[in-house]
Image (cartoon, rainbow, N blue to C red):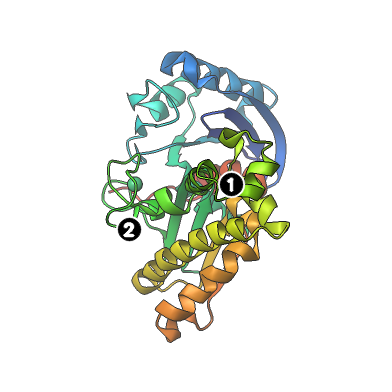
């Protein structure tokens, strides 16, 4: 590898398929994006992924391409490069994505879980630089994350570690996509906030949200709740405070388990700012043992929409140790 080596990275999402060319120092030299069209099924999406990679590789001399690295929704096997299934990619089951790409392009290829890669990206190139123990959490439609412990990404035995959104927080809470009940994701994600807000609006207990939505209760979502909170709506502030305190409970668990120095907290829901963060910190001060809060901070991510692409670069530079 030289400074001129090219790393082609892929962020395979349910909606967008993005590809970039990076130098090892994190400099982006080319990008390409298209829609995933996940509804067309697995074979069509894999073909589109190969075509999209080609859109980048053909812009550079072949010998410059050092590796290809893909972030995909999990659960997946980062060692064998197999996507077991992906809730937002219909029809995907046990797809040997790494081998398909590697055989097509004849370049070393890596595959990682998108949330874990975001953690790696923020750690190596973003808000987590210089730390050895940090946890990345993203709160949007769902809640995902990744754990850096002792200067290493925590993979677990089969590569499934770091599912911070699937901690049980409410034993009798709502059913989660994963089959469990009361996972953090079911009570503190954007989806959960929107669901609870609509339920209140339906019974006439959220008049301001009802008004903002022009009576279209089904259009009430977490972003609207955030807007209403800023305008002073007490019900919306309470909804965000509830989500914030649940996040506080989950982060207390993480503090006690992993003793991180940093939590990088991002995702669309965190745009609610202090309406979410204030109750979160209050919960930490009530529940976490004080030494865990010394030299500890919660900060926003720095890499924006490119976190998946840069995370895939970080994976190619620092692949999972073989076992
Ligand atoms: Zn769950």
Circle number at residue 122: none
The location of residue 116, given as percent across then percent down, is: 45, 49
Where disc 1 sits, the SS reads helix
Q: Is mark 1 within 8 Å of ligand 1?
A: no
Compared with residue 246, is residue 311 higher up or lower down, i.e. above or below?
above
Q: Residue at x 48, y 17 (%)?
A: 39
Compared with residue 103, is residue 109 higher up or lower down, i.e. above or below?
below
The location of residue 141, given as percent across then percent down, is: 51, 42
**Is disc 2 surrounded by few (<14), some (14 to 19) or many (20+) residues within 10 Å?**
some
Asked if the residue at tag 1 contacts the one at tag 2, i.e. Cβ–Cβ closer than 8 Å, the answer is no
Q: Nearer the viewer, residue 13 or 288?
A: 288
Q: Residue at x 61, y 31 (%)?
A: 18
Q: CA distance from mark 2 to mark 1?
A: 20 Å
Circle number at residue 222: 1
**Is disc 1 surrounded by few (<14), some (14 to 19) or many (20+) residues within 10 Å?**
many
Q: Nearer the viewer, residue 43 or 298?
A: 298
Q: Nearer the viewer, residue 144 or 275?
A: 275
Where disc 2 sits, the SS reads loop
The reply to whether residue 280 is visible in this rendering is: yes
Circle number at residue 170: 2
Q: Is mark 2 within 8 Å of ligand 1?
A: no
The reply to whether residue 24 is visible in this rendering is: no
Please tell me which of labels 2 and 1 falls first in the chain: 2
The location of residue 190, given as percent across then percent down, is: 53, 47
Quadrant housing the N terminus: top right
The location of residue 284, given as percent across then percent down, is: 47, 75
Q: Residue at x 46, y 68 (%)?
A: 133
Image quadrant in which you'd find residue 16: top right
Q: Nearer the viewer, residue 221 or 106?
A: 221
Taking 303 as reference, is 289 left or right? Answer: left
Compared with residue 149, is residue 293 higher up or lower down, i.e. above or below?
below
């Amino acid at each position: 590898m030289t400074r001129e080596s090219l790393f082609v990275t892929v962020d395979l999402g349910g909606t967008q398929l993005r590809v970039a060319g990076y130098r090892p120092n994190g400099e982006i030299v080319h990008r390409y994006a298209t829609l995933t069209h996940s509804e067309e099924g697995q074979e069509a999406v894999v073909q589109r992924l190969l075509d999209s990679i080609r859109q980048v590789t053909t812009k550079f001399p072949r010998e410059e391409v050092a590796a290809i690295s893909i972030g995909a929704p999990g659960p997946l096997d980062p060692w064998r490069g197999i996507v077991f299934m992906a809730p937002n990619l219909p029809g995907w089951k046990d797809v040997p994505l790494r081998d398909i790409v590697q055989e097509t392009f004849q370049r070393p290829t890596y595959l990682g879980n998108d949330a874990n890669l975001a953690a790696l990206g923020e750690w190596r190139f973003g808000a987590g630089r210089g730390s050895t123990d940090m946890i990345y959490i993203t709160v949007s439609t769902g809640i995902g994350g990744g754990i850096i412990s002792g200067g290493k990404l925590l993979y677990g035995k089969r590569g499934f570690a770091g599912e911070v959104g699937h901690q049980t927080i409410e034993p009798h809470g709502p059913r989660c996509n994963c089959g469990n009940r009361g996972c953090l994701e079911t009570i503190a994600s954007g989806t959960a906030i929107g669901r609870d807000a609509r339920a209140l609006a339906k019974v006439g207990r959220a008049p301001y949200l009802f008004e903002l939505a022009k009576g279209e209760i089904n259009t009430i979502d977490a972003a609207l709740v955030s807007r209403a909170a800023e305008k002073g709506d007490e019900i919306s502030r309470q909804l965000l405070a509830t989500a914030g305190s649940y996040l506080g409970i989950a982060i207390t668990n993480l503090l006690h388990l992993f003793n991180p120095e940093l939590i990088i907290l991002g995702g669309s829901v965190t745009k609610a700012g202090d309406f979410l963060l204030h109750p979160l910190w209050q919960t930490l001060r009530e529940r976490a043992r004080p030494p865990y809060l010394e030299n500890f901070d919660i900060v926003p991510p720095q890499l924006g929409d490119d976190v998946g692409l840069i995370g895939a670069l970080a994976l190619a530079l620092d692949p999972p140790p073989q076992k």
